[in-house]
Amino acid sequence: MNKAGAENAGKICVIGERSISLGFRLIGVMDTVEATGEEGLQRLAEAEKSGKYSVIFVSDSLKRSMDNRLLTYYETVLNPLIMFIPLPGEESEESLAAMAKRILGVDIGK
């Protein structure tokens, strides 16, 4: 890990609608971006390439703006770890067990 990576280890970014970013700000995550659609995708690319974050939480709604290749990339990249989260009140397409298996390779359902 380079020096910049060591300084930013554990740093979190959130990209999505106001309801998502506000919720994370309330728990102390200050690097939040209110953006959707193409702007959200641009901000996600910038955050991912910056090397400043260990985890980037992204609104599930941004998936609709991605082609399959880009979505597959973001779902499998590990550094930074990119986690798609549903809007408050919406159900997630992916269960916690499925997410753990995809990211960690561990089946927590057994």
Image: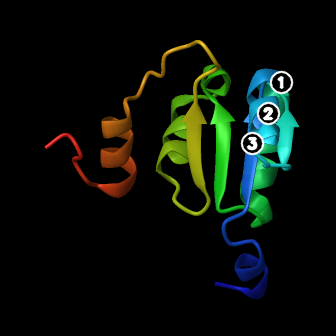
Dot 3 and dot 1 residues touching (CB under 8 Å):
no
Classed neighbour count for the residue bearing mark 3: other residues with Cα under 10 Å, few (<14), some (14–19), many (≥20): many
Q: Which residue is mark 1?
A: 18
Is there CB contact under 8 Å for labels 2 and 3?
yes
Residue 2 against residue 62 in the figure, above or below: below
Residue at coordinates 35% horizontally, 56% vertically from top-left? 104
Where 44 sits versus 36, above or below? below
Under mark 1, the amino acid is Arg
**Left or right relative to 64: residue 78:** left
Front residue of 102/27: it is: 27
Question: Which quadrant is home to the N terminus?
Answer: bottom right
Residue type beneath disc 3? Val
The residue wearing badge 2 is: 21
Where is mark 3, residue-wise?
14
Q: Dots 1 and 2: beta carbons under 8 Å? A: yes
* SS at mark 3 in the image: strand
Quadrant of the image for the C terminus? top left
Residue ID at (82%, 31%):
22
Which is more N-terminal, label 3 or label 2? 3
- Whether residue 60 sits left or right of residue 96 in the image: it is right
In this rendering, would 68 be left or right of 95? right
